[in-house]
Image: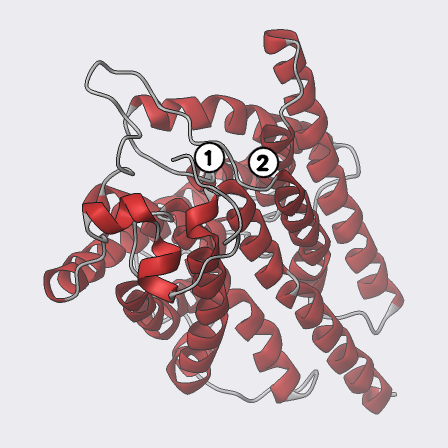
Amino acid sequence: MPELSYALDTLFALFAMTLIIFMVPGFAMLEAGLVRSKNVAAVLTVNTMIYAVASMFFLLVGYSLAFGSWENDTMSKWAAFLFQMAFVGKTVNIMSGGVSERVRIVPLMLFTVVMAALIYPIAVNLTWGANFLKGTALDISAMHDLAGSTVIHSTGAWALLAAILIIGPRKGRYTPNGTIRVFPASNIPLVVLGAMLLWIGWFGFNGGSVGSISSKESADAVALTIMNTNTAGLAGAIVVALVEYIRYKKFDITMILNGALGGLVAVTAGADIFDIYTPILIGAIGGLIVVFGVPFFDKLRIDDPVGALSVHLLNGVWGTLAVGIFADVSFFAQLKGVLVIGIFAFISSYVVLYAINKFVVFRIDAESETEGLDINECGLESYPEFTRTI
């Protein structure tokens, strides 16, 4: 019954899209909880505007560039678009958290336009889409990246790295004598809520990327993908909790949650083709990457308030390469995909960010940074009754 299959897969895509949209408040709550109280309203505004702006320009330009056509024989073409649209803002969400507390909203939105209309769609074109490099030496269509360990997570994180190199660290983060000043999170409950919303959204993120649920085989594939996704998140959280307790005799919930997210990023490339045990190892290594990645970037004075480089960049690379290690997929194809997308995403993002910064400066002035972005960028505070200490 082709009409029933069409209807079921359309419903499945719309449901998965809805789960992915839950990641919008997920990113917003996670970032709002991790930054200082004087910057919370700005973070919430940025995340809301990213969803609106990125989705609009993906509709107008990006989707056609990525896929070449709106036609779809397996489900409603509108459902297929909405599912893909749900992904696009995540690339900038990844970036926005890492440059929070010192970046102005207008230039960030200008970059969002370019990311949604050009940079991300080109990355999709080369992998999941029309592939204008097919048959050339740079063809990376053989890379298996189910839901975007590289295409989404690494792309957004390469853009973040480029932005940090241009914008620099937060004021006072690194002292002249080499010490690192800790800026405490403003709201730990929001961090937990945001991370759990992201975790739940990941079931649509990865499960929906299987593409169909209208047959027994595809239904099993979706269930396996979601199970493996969850398993990797569990492993990442558990390993980070153990390491933190062994090292400090303390449980840092922010690190535990980032460990879970690292595991989720890592399994995103191959959750559909792993057995039920491999994600335990992949997620555990993903958690360890977060534990050691966060201080590594701080030693380099690369200021990332939410740990996005460790979660999304390092684990995006690890997860993509893990497919070539643990599944019947060419490791060379995976490595080639990581390199091609990484070079393209970093260089294109750096050029665009540098150009925008020449005309509309990304970084807020030092006085406004001290006072907080809420007052200077949004004209309101999230916690006006509280006395700020830093």
Q: Is residue 262 left or right of residue 245?
A: left
Q: Quadrant of the N terminus?
A: bottom right
Residue 362 position by quadrant: bottom left
Task: Write the residue at 48% across / 76% down.
Answer: 52
Q: Which residue is mark 2?
A: 258
Secondary element under disc 2, as helix, strand or loop, is: helix
Residue 323 position by quadrant: top right
| 77 or 240, nearer to the observer | 240
Vertical relation: 149 (above or below) 45: above
Q: Position of residue 3 (x, y in %)?
A: 82, 91
Q: Is residue 93 left or right of residue 258?
A: left
Task: Write the residue at 65% across / 59% down.
Answer: 205
CB contact under 8 Å: marks 1 and 2: yes
Q: Which residue is mark 1?
A: 310
Q: Position of residue 59 (x, y in %)?
A: 46, 83
Three-letter amino acid code of the residue under disc 2: Asn
Task: Write the residue at 68% across / 27% down.
Answer: 281
**Mark 2, residues whose alpha carbon is within 10 Å: few (<14), some, or many (≥20)?**
many
